[in-house]
Amino acid sequence: MSSVDFEVLEATMHWLDAGHRMLLVTVVKTWGSSPRPEGAMLVLRDDGRVVGSISGGCIEDDLIDQVRRYGVAQGVPKVVEYGISAEEAHRFGLPCGGTMRLVLEPITRQSRIQALHEALSRGELVARTLDMTTGAVTLGPPGTTDGVHFNGMHLTTIHGPRYRMLVIGAGQLSRYLCQVATGLDYQVVVCDPREEYVQTWNVPGTQLVRTMPDDTVLEMRPDERSAIITLTHDPKLDDLALMEALKTPAFYVGALGSRRNNAARRERLKEFDLSDAELARLRGPAGIYIGSRTPPEIAVSILAEVTAAKNRVSLPAILRVERGKTAKAITNDGTPISALDRVW
């Protein structure tokens, strides 16, 4: 889960200990455009204090006003919707056509917030199921690694460790990429056994290890919340990581390099008993084509592709680095843009 949602649970636990009444508000469904995704949470205290976010602020303001007017009733959870009409969408600052369905849950000792917080502190992945008719909560192993499931009777939310990112190489590009990745709430580990690179590494919020890349991948045990990116340009390091990473459920495995280098890399990886399906998972050259040249721009390009993969967004082929560079070369030669369809 994101650090923001973890802060929501921590605030809920502390405010409950202090004797406050409060509502835990969860986005369970969105239609059209919406400021925050399904699963976003906030906790609203009886005096109007808020931790977390479910919109750009207007819905929060309305909920705060309701609590200040009527207090927090100790009853069963209820469902509310915002943005059903165009006028209401405009009033609450929702994008055109946006609608949000929320569950408002009065928090009590039976809400099991402390037990959930303790499980998350141990790094566990937990499904929290709320019974809408009684307010009772159960905690258990999740059937999936992410998502929100609401059928009107039960609300199940998945909570667990932040998304993880393993970066092979501690060079200049890695510094820019890791700075942004920590801002995107990844738990970042940087692997580089080379002495000359680790001596100058200083990116707050990251962990630096000096083990060999293949051993690092095996020790990490990547899951569906993991991304692995190789940035050294050194086959002795990058290939070691990739030969293990491509066998894991990691949602993103990418490698920096030119189109020619990546073609050669794929041929080398075939010698490590990787299947065609496993090789097809390799994103290389890593990133989307935005004309990036400097290390900061390349970092943005790579993280844009990682974000799309994390959010299960299928990017058009023209955005891949190799396709984008080919398209630029064609158009620079005077080929009309309409002719690009024949290239793809």
Image: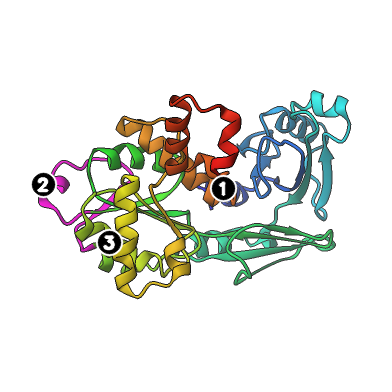
What residue is rendered at 43% in x and 41% in y? 321
User: Please, what is the three-letter code of the amino acid marked with disc 3?
Assistant: Asp
Q: Is residue 88 magenta?
A: no
Q: Is the magenta stretch mostly helix, strand or loop?
A: loop
For residue 230, above or below residue 67: below
The location of residue 190, given as percent across then percent down, is 28, 52
Does residue 55 show up?
yes
What residue is rendered at 48% in x and 24% in y? 334
What residue is rendered at 58% in x and 49% in y? 311
Does residue 10 show up?
no
Q: Dot 3 corresponds to which residue?
A: 239
**Which residue is at the far left?**
196
Q: Is residue 195 left or right of residue 160?
A: left
Q: Neighbour class for label 3 at 10 Å: few (<14), some, many (≥20)? A: many
Q: Dot 1 corresponds to which residue?
A: 5
Q: Does the magenta stretch include residue 197?
A: yes
Between disc 3 and disc 2, the foreground one is: 3
Q: Is residue 128 left or right of residue 303?
A: right
**Cα distance in 3D space between marks 3 and 2:** 20 Å
**Cα distance in 3D space between marks 3 and 1:** 36 Å
Label disc, if present, on residue 196 of the rendered structure: 2
Which of the marked residues, 3 or 2, is nearer the chain's N terminus? Answer: 2
Between disc 3 and disc 1, the foreground one is: 3
The location of residue 155, given as percent across then percent down, is 74, 59
